[in-house]
Image (cartoon, coloured by chain):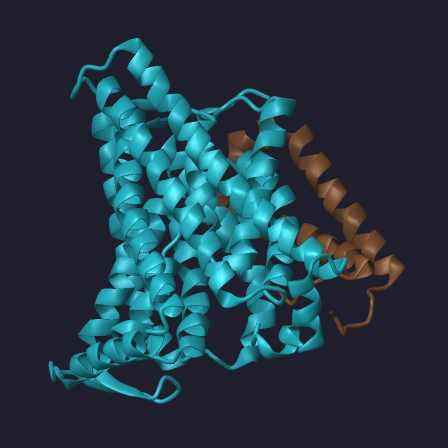
Amino acid sequence: MSKKSKPSFVRTLVFLLSAAAAYVLIFLNIEKLNAFYLSKHIIPAISLLGTIVVVSYLYGNAVSCILGHLGIDSDH
Amino acid sequence: MAGAPVDLAGQMMQFITITPKTALAVAGIGFLGGTLSGFLGSGGAFVMTPAMMALGVPGISAVSSNLAHKFGKAMVGARKHSKMGNVDAKLGICMIIFLLLGVRLAVFLQKYIFASMGKTGSNLYISIVFVILLTGLSLFILRDLARSRSGGNNKGSTGTLKLAKKMSQIKIPPMVHFKVANIKISLWFPALVALATGWLAGTVGVGGFIGVPAMIYLLGIPTTVAAGTELFLAIFSGAFGSFQYALSGFVDIRLVLLLYLGSLLGLHIGANATRMVHETKIKLVMAIVIGMSAVSRAFAVPKYLNDLNYVSLSQTAAKVCDIAADITLFGGASVGAILILWYVARYRFGLGKQAQELESVGFAESSGH
């Protein structure tokens, strides 16, 4: 099905641990973060979107690597 | 994890409290939406926005969180899709201004309705838009399916080409030639399409399901270029819309991150499934999910009208409507996701004759996905 080579184990581990760390850090500090993100100014709004992009990049790559190992990765 | 209150023009909005059960439910909604998005090309918001509303998330927060979720996904996806060469940059740039205008209009309307009618009024507005759009879209897909089955697809294609040709013959200046899309058309038509797409993106969290067909059928743009250009535009509508909502404090980052947990996984599974099934099955799943989502929002409308004192419903009737809305929404999405997983499992593990036949004729390579 997929003709791409499997991603390296180290790459998978790095993305997986980074994504997990990002989730843990954000959810453990959500009260403080929300106080900043919901302050209705330009910098907090940009920071909020930046956080979303970084987490989606880390977790998206982690999922892609894991599924690549399982042989069900897609080009999305 | 308690939700933070947001003050807007005197209206206090409370983000929902996230318990382990709610977190699992939101991640599950993300998985359903992601699977459907990957399988259908777009459309996770059809399910994700109403499903979050069913969990008690205010509609405006569900839309804005969904838009932020879509923006992150589009940013990541754009890296891969930029190499496809299917984007008409000139067309995209011409459409961006009107797209952002549409988004701005939608955000303004949402805020106005929220400020004047509160959370219930905002939920009612979003639900009515969903009912009208999703019903129309579902009927359109079913008609297309029926035509395909009766062998009348060519007639339909000719009809739509005729419509695009008629549009190109209306010479309202300025007439612009778009090289990649290979069309010469009045600038006002792409502008109107962009305005509608932007308004929808800002209102329900997704605009591509109208933008792509409109570009194909009204403007006569080839399917691949329409899809590529829409993806290019989605980054801007997602970024601008979520930024506008974030400025008012409506984006709940907890919801966005929990949605990602399921959606990015589902996206890969859904995208893989498209290589394994025939186009008619993709359309069938699409019609089921969209149709059930429309029915679900239709059941939710009387309860909102009752809460706003526009109609009077007994407690039992309101409860029945509430339950019916949940059953139709989650039932439709679950049936869609189960069908997709079944297609994947059947292909992967060689279950059933059809899967083997598809593999033997190299369907995966010839399907064009």
Side (left or right) of B108 relative to A17: left
Q: In this view, which residue lies farthest toward the top?
A: B315
The quarter of the image holding the C terminus of chain B is bottom right
Query: Which residue is found at the position 61% from the left and 37% from the top?
Result: B27
Image position of B197 with respect to B11: above or below: below
* Residue nearest the observer in this picture, B142 or B7: B142
Query: Which residue is found at the position 60% from the left and 37% from the top?
Result: B28
Query: Which residue is found at the position 44% from the left and 71% from the top?
Result: B227
* Residue nearest the observer in this picture, B178 or B314: B314
The location of residue B94, given as percent across then percent down, is 30, 75
Side (left or right) of B286 relative to B130: right
Image position of A68 with respect to B161: above or below: above
The quarter of the image holding the N terminus of chain B is top right
What hue does chain A carry in this figure? brown
Label total for image: 0
Q: In this view, which residue lies farthest toward the right?
A: A9
The location of residue B205, given as percent across then percent down, is 39, 48
The location of residue B130, given as percent across then percent down, is 31, 43
Determine the image quadrant of residue B163: bottom left
Side (left or right) of B175 relative to B317: left
Q: Is residue B54 visible?
A: yes
Image position of B156 with respect to A61: above or below: below
The location of residue B284, given as percent across then percent down, is 45, 56
Q: Is residue B242 visible?
A: no
What hue does chain B carry in this figure? cyan
Query: Which residue is found at the position 65% from the left and 67% from the top?
Result: A75
